[in-house]
Image (spheres, grey):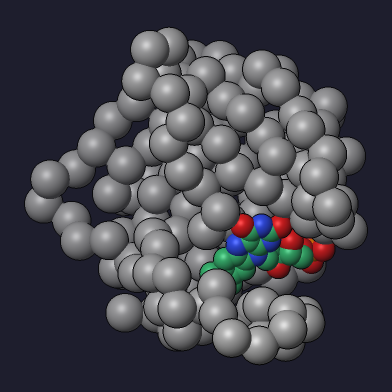
Amino acid sequence: MKKVNTKNFKKTLSKFTTGITVVCVKHNNSIYGKTVNSFNSLSLNPPMVLFSLGNYSSSIKQFSKTKFLSINILSNKQKKLSDSFASNAPDLEDIKFIEGKNKTVIIPNCIANLECELIDKIKKGDHVIFICKILELQSNDKLKPLVYFNSKYF
Ligand SMILES: Cc1cc2nc3c(=O)[nH]c(=O)nc-3n(C[C@H](O)[C@H](O)[C@H](O)COP(=O)(O)O)c2cc1C
């Protein structure tokens, strides 16, 4: 075993395979989205999930102020979207967002979408954990997931 530092911590966590989500909020009629793989299930009853966002993110204020948000689980055909929402200027023009029931915006053609109510935020280290209750959802059995391992897409 080695002593932990930022470099070996990042490298070691990259060995944990995840899917990829884009979390979205609408704030003052503008859409904000971030690529996030810290998504996880939290509770079955009531249905809750969580993800964490760096407190340095350009969109942290908009996410912290929202009551509702969407979590969009990407398919293997949506690599471009993942890269775009990981940048500080995502390309929103080509996305035909679907309006959710609760003032949310949903990304089309995902393997699954969750419409959520933000019920708690916990600041830990340099991230904020967002705890969300699921209000509405849908999934597509025909699509395959976008997978992230070792800092690469599969
Ligand atoms: C595959 C992938 C997963 C990511 N997961 C997270 C995450 O869980 N939490 C997070 O804060 N940033 C995550 N990021 C980084 C953000 O998408 C974004 O680049 C970062 O928040 C900086 O955003 P900013 O340019 O708006 O400041 C991820 C990036 C990639 C490519």
Between residue 5 and residue 28, name the one nearer to us: 5
Q: Is residue 31 left or right of residue 56?
A: left
Q: Residue furthest front?
A: 1
The answer to whether residue 51 is above or below residue 100 is below
Residue shown at the point (73%, 80%) measured from the top left: 4
Residue 61 position in % (x across, y down): 88, 39
Residue 151 position in % (x across, y down): 51, 83
Between residue 138 and residue 5, name the one nearer to us: 5
Q: Which image quadrant is residue 68 in?
A: top right
Q: Is residue 102 left or right of residue 75?
A: right
Q: Is residue 27 visible?
A: no
Residue 42 position in % (x across, y down): 47, 31
The answer to whether residue 83 is above or below residue 45 is below
Residue shown at the point (46%, 43%) measured from the top left: 40
Quarter of image, ligand 1: bottom right
Residue 74 position in % (x across, y down): 38, 56
Residue shown at the point (43%, 23%) measured from the top left: 43
The answer to whether residue 76 is above or below residue 125 is below
Quadrant in the picture for the N terminus: bottom right
Between residue 41 and residue 61, name the one nearer to us: 41
Q: Is residue 97 left or right of residue 66?
A: left
Q: Which image quadrant is residue 90 in?
A: bottom right
Quadrant in the picture for the C terminus: bottom left
Q: Is residue 138 visible?
A: yes
Q: How many marks?
A: 0
